[in-house]
Image (spheres, rainbow, N blue to C red):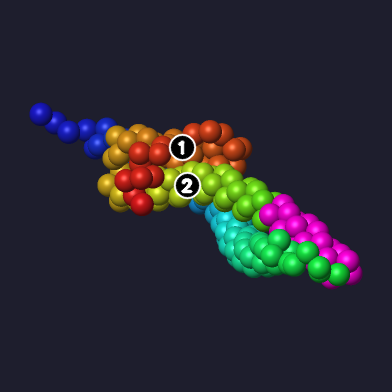
Amino acid sequence: MDIDPIDTVDQARQADQAKSRLHTLVAITVALLATFMGICKVKDDNIVQAMQQAQADKLDHWAFYQARNVREDVASATLLQLQLGLAAAPPALSAPARANYEAAIERYTHFVGEQKHKKEELQAAAGRDQAVYDAANFRDDQFDMSDAFLAISVAMLAVTALTAQRWLFALSMVPTAIGVVMGLAGLCQWAIHPAWLVALLT
């Protein structure tokens, strides 16, 4: 069987063109993914900073809560002592002394109520800080998943460029799609969160 040199050259040229098209497709895909990953990284860094701030605020509020709690306990003990002192005072206690007791009791009663109210405000503020942290952590998990899947995709695309296997390029689109969806979920605040996968990796 004769081999036509022209057909052989044409086939080689077509194979080279197909390989070149695949390499171009891989290069464009990697460039787009790198750009998308860069955008997600900037947003994720800002979210991490917000998480750190929320955590610091929560710790500050709980520290102030504990301080208010101590002040309330001390004031309550002082109030009790004043009330017991007035109750145990002799009937002959002078009117000015009795008035001083009653004024001190009134002042400490107000102080105890004030500390309790401020303590409740701090507890509510710490709860809000935790809610902010949880919401930011939800989005941080989305960006982490996006980064992981896109890294897998880029690795598969690198192997595709070396082997020139089109099926491997098609297979790499699976982690690419998941990574892009998770990145968009983080950017657009979509409620997509693979909790089981996050729990597996943490």
Question: What residue is rendered at 61% in x and 37% in y?
Answer: 188
Q: Is residue 72 visible?
A: no
Vertical position of residue 138 compared to residue 90: above or below = above
Front one among 78 and 182: 78
As for residue 159 lying within the magenta part, the answer is: no
Vertical position of residue 32 compared to residue 119: above or below = above
- Residue annotated with mark 2: 141
Question: What residue is rendered at 69% in x and 54% in y?
Answer: 116
- Residue annotated with mark 1: 193
Front one among 128 and 16: 128
Callout 1 secondary element: loop
Q: Which residues are magenta?
A: 95-117
Q: Amino acid at mark 2?
A: Asp
Vertical position of residue 79 compared to residue 180: above or below = below
Q: Residues within 10 Å of mark 1 (few under 14, many from 20)?
A: some
Question: What residue is rendered at 67% in x and 51% in y?
Answer: 120
Q: Residues within 10 Å of mark 2 (few under 14, many from 20)?
A: many
Residue found at the very far left of the displayed protein? 1
As for residue 115 lying within the magenta part, the answer is: yes
Q: Amino acid at mark 1?
A: His
Q: Is residue 171 left or right of residue 59?
A: left
Front one among 42 and 24: 42
